Each structure stands twice: as structure tokens, then as C-alpha cells.
């Protein structure tokens, strides 16, 4: 039973590593676009809650 869990975990790690490698390859191929995406994500994470507060309906 432990062996089965180890194999499953190893498969998950391999899948994750493959996805991370794909992302790293894309970032290397398109560095300017990757910077724009990261900036947009950072803006969304920091400005998103503030926008929600500003958009409350008036009473």
C-alpha cells in the first residue's frame, strides 16, 4: 500500500515538474510578455480588493 502511494506521489511530482518546465520555456521564449502578465497579476492582486470596496452600491 505504501508503494502505491509513493508511485502516485511521484507521478504527481513529474506532472508538476513538466508543467513548470513548460512555463519556464515560455517565459524564456517570451520574456516581455511574461513581464506584462506578472505586472497584471500583481495589479489585480493588490488593486482588486480596493476596487471592490470602491464599487459598493450607494445607500
Image (cartoon, helix red, strand yellow):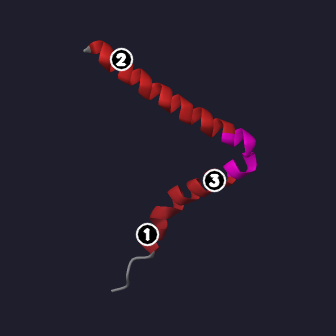
Where is residue 23, by image quadrant?
top right
Q: CA distance from mark 2 to mark 3?
A: 36 Å
Q: Residues within 10 Å of mark 2 (few under 14, many from 20)?
A: few
* Label 3 secondary element: helix
List the residue tagged with mark 2. 6
Considering the image in quadrants, where does the C terminus appear? Answer: bottom left
Q: CA distance from mark 2 to mark 1?
A: 44 Å
List the residue tagged with mark 3. 37
Which residue corresponds to the image point at 35% horizontal and 17% vertical from the top-left? 6
Whole-percent x, y for residue 29 in the image:
74, 42
List the residue tagged with mark 1. 52
User: What span is in magenta?
Assistant: 26-35
Is residue 50 shown above or below 12? Answer: below
Where is residue 9, by image quadrant?
top left
Q: Is residue 58 magenta?
A: no
Q: CA distance from mark 3 to mark 1?
A: 21 Å
Which residue corresponds to the image point at 58% horizontal and 58% vertical from the top-left? 43
Is residue 39 shown above or below 51? Answer: above
Q: Residues within 10 Å of mark 3 (few under 14, many from 20)?
A: few
Amino acid at each position: 500500500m505504501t508503494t502505491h502511494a509513493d508511485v502516485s506521489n511521484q507521478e504527481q511530482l513529474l506532472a508538476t515538474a513538466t508543467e513548470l518546465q513548460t512555463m519556464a520555456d515560455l517565459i524564456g521564449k517570451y520574456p516581455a510578455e511574461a513581464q506584462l502578465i506578472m505586472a497584471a497579476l500583481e495589479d489585480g492582486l493588490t488593486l482588486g480588493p480596493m476596487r471592490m470596496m470602491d464599487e459598493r452600491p450607494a445607500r
